[in-house]
Amino acid sequence: MKLQQVLSYVRKAVDDYQMIEDGDKIAIGISGGKDSLTLLYALHSLRRFYPKHFDIHAVTVDLGFQNLNLDKIKDLCRELEVEYTIVQTDIANIIFEERKEDNPCSLCAKMRKGALNQAIKEAGCQKIAYAHHKDDVVETMLMSLIFEGRFHTFSPVTYLDRTQLTVIRPLLYMNEADVIGFVHKHDVPVVKSPCPADGYTKREYVKNLLRQLNQENPGVKERMFTAIQSGNMKGWTTYGCIK
């Protein structure tokens, strides 16, 4: 997938849900994975021509794994002339060595977000861009149905009262396959996650389930996404054409 196609998806999401206002300073949470790096490329390119001026600041929370190498991300941010902050933590040691968590993902996410939000505030950002794409939206809805018994997923724009930060999700209209295509075409320097729990989570189970459902019933993922858009959930009303 070409960058121009990525920008088309991102521009539509940003406009539909009014994600960006003039003067925004937006932090981008960079894990080093394909999704967050695609988002970095997209917002870097979008700010060149978007009618509302905004700045971006890349932030990575280093969990403390010994085999994580962020040099390629540093080089990329330097090439794009994007500010880059690495937050050093010992989260990995706390979760896997001290506490020896059987289900580490929930606590890790909570600690990681705490460290990330603090760094964002210190950098003077009012918003944080997460790299959730269409597959993430549908997978989260399925997880909620299967494990919580409710029809729910995250919204395109979320205001966090406790931190007074606004979360935006500009990759909302992109499929994971689109992201993979972009990464391969542009040789994006993806950094593999060193987390030992990676690939062994409830989300991974639901991801595989959705893939199977979509293979057996072509188009089911798109229909689920449409159901989310028209399901009257908070935050899902567009400012353009009401879907």
Image (tube, rainbow, N blue to C red):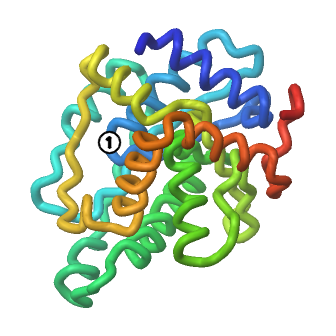
Location of residue 92 in the rendering, given as x and y in whole percent from the top left corner: 24, 72
Residue 82 vs residue 157, the one in the foreground: 157
For residue 28, above or below residue 139: above
What residue is drawn where x is 36% and y is 63%? 205
Helix, strand or loop for disc 1: loop
As drawn, which residue projects farthest toward the front? 216
Location of residue 224 in the rendering, given as x and y in whole percent from the top left corner: 63, 46
Q: Name the quadrant containing residue 152.
A: bottom right
Q: Name the quadrant containing residue 43.
A: top right
Q: Is residue 100 visible?
A: yes
Residue 84 appears left or right of 27: left
Residue 89 appears left or right of 38: left
Location of residue 167 in the rendering, given as x and y in whole percent from the top left corner: 65, 50
Locate the N terminus by quadrant.
top left
Q: Name the quadrant containing residue 61.
A: bottom left
Q: Residues within 10 Å of mark 1 (few under 14, many from 20)?
A: some
- Read off the residue under disc 1: 33
Location of residue 3 in the rendering, given as x and y in whole percent from the top left corner: 46, 13
What residue is drawn where x is 40% and y is 20%? 80
Q: Is residue 59 visible?
A: no
For residue 34, above or below residue 196: above
As drawn, which residue projects farthest toward the left? 67
Residue 106 appears left or right of 134: left
What residue is drawn where x is 60% and y is 12%? 48
Residue 211 vs residue 238, the one in the foreground: 211
Dot 1 amino acid type: Gly
